[in-house]
Image (cartoon, grey):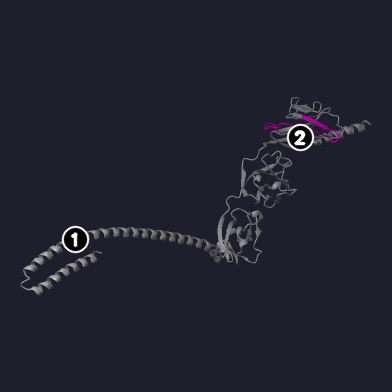
Amino acid sequence: MKMLSRMFILCIALSGVSNSAALITVSGYEGYAVGISCSYGMGYDSYEKYLCRNDCGSNDVLVTTTETSKNRFSIYDDKEKRVFTASITGLTLTDAGKYWCGVTRNGKDIYTEVKLLVGKDSCCDQSTRLQSYEDGSVDLICPYKQKDQDNLKYICRGNQSSTCLQQALVTSEYKQKGYFSLADNKMSMKFTVTITSLTRKDSGPYLCGVQRKSDLDVFTAVSLEVNEWCCVESSELSGIVGHPLSIQCPYPPQHWDNRKFLCKGDHRKNCTDVMTQSRFSLQDNVSSSSFSVMITRTKVEDAGTYWCGSDSQWAVGNFTKIHLSLDAEHFLSVGVMLPTVGAIVLVILIISVVIIYKYKCRRAQGTKIQEKRNQTKVAGVEEVIDVADIYENQGAAACSKQETSKWHSSCHQNDNDDVYQNCSTTEDMYCNQFYLKTAKR
């Protein structure tokens, strides 16, 4: 019986020695808690367990199962699993170092060495910056070392290393989750996380993580900026209904072998491909890095907004926005303009008639006034003529007397001739008077 008891104690001792030879590596992050779990062999269920530092002297013991909590340290013994766990809260960088898990027993205690790593809870000093646009996609490329080829890869939002794995968006075990997907290329030692259907809320910092079982996880930081569609190249185009029309679309030279497209709609999200219609034909000119779409005969419903490009992911700068406006046929335009032109001409004619009428009225009034003035002048002239006639008659009478006296003085010399001469003189006077009045009138 004693022999069996000694053999049992020897097995326990050997078990303790083998455990002491093992090294446990535990990692944590500044400000957070960490748990150090240590197993023990059968028969030590009721023995005291503890956690200590340095040489494990009496002053180096941090916590024991006899006093389960002390300052930032606590301990719990799961006797069924034969594992006790010591926890440290509020980690600091100075907490990093060597620890010992101890089991108290008669003679020399059983020890298991523990290496504690404490890292900063923020990463990283350098970050890769990426830009993309709403509704597009982006690839986040994360490099790693060769020794991590078979380790778990993951990505999370933010820059907290301590919670990154717990909040992972996608991992190399679960490669697809929502708009996120992960592809691991072990040959190039890079894993790529693709985000599709981007929104502006996707902007911010990301951490690419590689899990290491015996060390702190390794991270690379990526800063993503998702911009609003603001700088789209836009152009205006006009045509006539029923006539052919050509739409020109430039594209980046590197897209020479991409599929080219033209769609119609107020927004790129809901535009409809028009190349399925027989009236539309596309011709690609690789030398000029552009393609043209010909519409053989335009229709009224063809007016609107078009989007043409060479990138199915709608990357900005790889497409053009076109506003197309269409006018009716030329004769229809003339027909619409004729009533307007006729109305304008009619107004001009009416104004012209009014002006001419007023001009004639003023001219007629002026003529009447002039006639009245002329009549007044004629009346004045006639009065002057009458007075002149009086004086002329008086002169003629005087002249007649003189002639009469002459006639009497010469009457004895030549009676017949003087009679005819005097009569002629008198007739001339009256004839001259009649002529003068007529001329003046």
Please identify the quadrant where the C terminus is shown.
bottom left
Tell how many labels: 2
169 relative position to 1: left or right: left
| Quadrant of image for the N terminus | top right
Q: Where's residue 352, x and y in %?
A: 43, 61
Q: Magenta includes 437?
A: no
Q: Quadrant of residue 291?
A: bottom right
Say what amino acid the circle numbered 2 marks: Gly
- What's the distance in space between the residues labelled 2 and 1, CA to CA? 158 Å
Which SS class for mark 2? Answer: strand
Part of the protein shown in magenta: 74-96
Relative to 179, is 415 above or below?
below
Q: Nearer the viewer, residue 204 or 174?
A: 204
Residue 384, quarter of picture = bottom left
Give percent across and percent down for residue 367. 34, 60
Q: Amino acid at mark 1?
A: Ile
The disc, 2 or 1, on the residue closer to the chain's N-terminal end is 2
Q: Decide if residue 364 is in sight here.
A: yes
Q: Residues within 10 Å of mark 1 (few under 14, many from 20)?
A: few
Residue at horizontal 44%, vertical 61%?
353
Is residue 212 toward the left or the right of residue 290 in the image? right
Q: Which residue is mark 2?
A: 35
Q: Position of residue 234 (x, y in %)?
A: 57, 55
What secondary structure is marked by label 1? helix
Badge number at residue 390: 1
Disc 2 residue crowd, few under 14, some 14–19, many 20+, Cα 10 Å: some
Disc 2 + disc 1, Cβ < 8 Å:
no
Q: Position of residue 68 (x, y in %)?
A: 79, 27
Residue 250 position (above or below residue 4): below
